[in-house]
C-alpha cells in the first residue's frame, strides 16, 4: 500500500500560506532541491487542494528540462475541488466529490507513494480520516509576523499524533522534520 506523504513549508510562527512570497525561497539551496526531487521520485502521484494547484500550475506546467519539473509534469495529479472545472495542467484529474475516498483508493494501488503538497482543508480531512501517513514540515528559519488564523497550520477541530522519524538540517537553515502518523488506516 502506498504511503500518503504531506510536504509543507512552514515558518517559525506557524504560517503556511503563500510560501512563494517568503524571503528564504530565493536561496533554497541545491540540498533542498535534491530532497524535493528524491521525494517526488519515490511517488507515483501528486495530490493537492485547489489553492495549491492554482499556485503550482502557472510555475511547474511551464517548466521542463530539470528533474523536478519533468517528474511533476509527468505524474498523475489529483486535485480536490468542487469549483475547478477545466484543469490546464497535463495529467490532472479533479476530485469533485468524495476526495478522501478517492485518495484512500489511490493508496491501495500498486506502485510508489503519493505526495500531497500544501496543508489546507484537504489535509485536515485526510488527517481526520486516518489516511495521512507522513508529515514533512520544512521549517523556514524566520518569523513572518503577519497573517491571520487562516494562514496558520493549526486549525480547531483536527488532531493527530505523530512520531518524529527523521530530521534534516539544510545549509540554508531550513530544517525538514519528518513525522509518521501513530494511527493510520493502513
Image: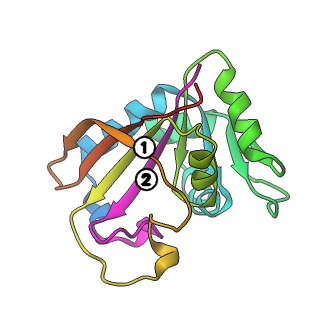
Q: Residue at x 69, y 37 (%)?
A: 103
146, above or below 114, in the image: below
185 on left or right of 18? right
Along the viewing direction, whichever of 21 and 81 lies nearer the viewer: 81
Along the viewing direction, whichever of 167 and 172 lies nearer the viewer: 167
Which tag, 1 or 2, sits closer to the chain's start? 2
> Is residue 66 visible in this depiction of the protein?
no
- Farthest-out residue, top: 110
Q: Residue at x 53, y 28 (%)?
A: 3
Residue for badge 2: 8
Question: Label 1: how many residues lie within 10 Å, few (<14), some (14-19) or many (20+)?
Answer: many
Along the viewing direction, whichever of 138 and 1 lies nearer the viewer: 1
> Is residue 35 visible in this depiction of the protein?
yes
Give how far across and how far down residue 26 sits, in percent: 30, 63
**Which numbered marker is on residue 65?**
none
- Colouring chosen for the image of the structure: rainbow
Question: Label 2: how many residues lie within 10 Å, few (<14), some (14-19) or many (20+)?
Answer: many
Q: Quadrant of residue 100?
A: top right
Magenta stretch: residue 21 in it? Answer: yes
Q: Quadrant of the N terminus?
A: top right
Q: Which residues are magenta?
A: 1-23
Q: Secondary structure at mark 1?
A: strand
Give how far across and how far down residue 109 sits, in percent: 68, 19
Q: Residue at x 16, y 56 (%)?
A: 173
**Which numbered marker is on residue 135?**
1
Amino acid at each position: 500500500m502506498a504511503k500518503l506523504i504531506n510536504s509543507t513549508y512552514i515558518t517559525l510562527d506557524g504560517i503556511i500560506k503563500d510560501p512563494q512570497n517568503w524571503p528564504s525561497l530565493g536561496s533554497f539551496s541545491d540540498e533542498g532541491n535534491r530532497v524535493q526531487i528524491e521525494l517526488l521520485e519515490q511517488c507515483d502521484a501528486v495530490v493537492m487542494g485547489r489553492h495549491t494547484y492554482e499556485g503550482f500550475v502557472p510555475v511547474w506546467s511551464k517548466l521542463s528540462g530539470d528533474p523536478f519539473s519533468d517528474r511533476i509534469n509527468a505524474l498523475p495529479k489529483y486535485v480536490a475541488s468542487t469549483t475547478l472545472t477545466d484543469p490546464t495542467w497535463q495529467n490532472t484529474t479533479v476530485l469533485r466529490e468524495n476526495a478522501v475516498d478517492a485518495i484512500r483508493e489511490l493508496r491501495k494501488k500498486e506502485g510508489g507513494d503519493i505526495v500531497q503538497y500544501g496543508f489546507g482543508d484537504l489535509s485536515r480531512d485526510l488527517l481526520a480520516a486516518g489516511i495521512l501517513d507522513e508529515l514533512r514540515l520544512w521549517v523556514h528559519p524566520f518569523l513572518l509576523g503577519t497573517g491571520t488564523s487562516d494562514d496558520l497550520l493549526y486549525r480547531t477541530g483536527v488532531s493527530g499524533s505523530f512520531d518524529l522519524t527523521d530530521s534534516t538540517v539544510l545549509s540554508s537553515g531550513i530544517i525538514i522534520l519528518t513525522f509518521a502518523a501513530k494511527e493510520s488506516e493502513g
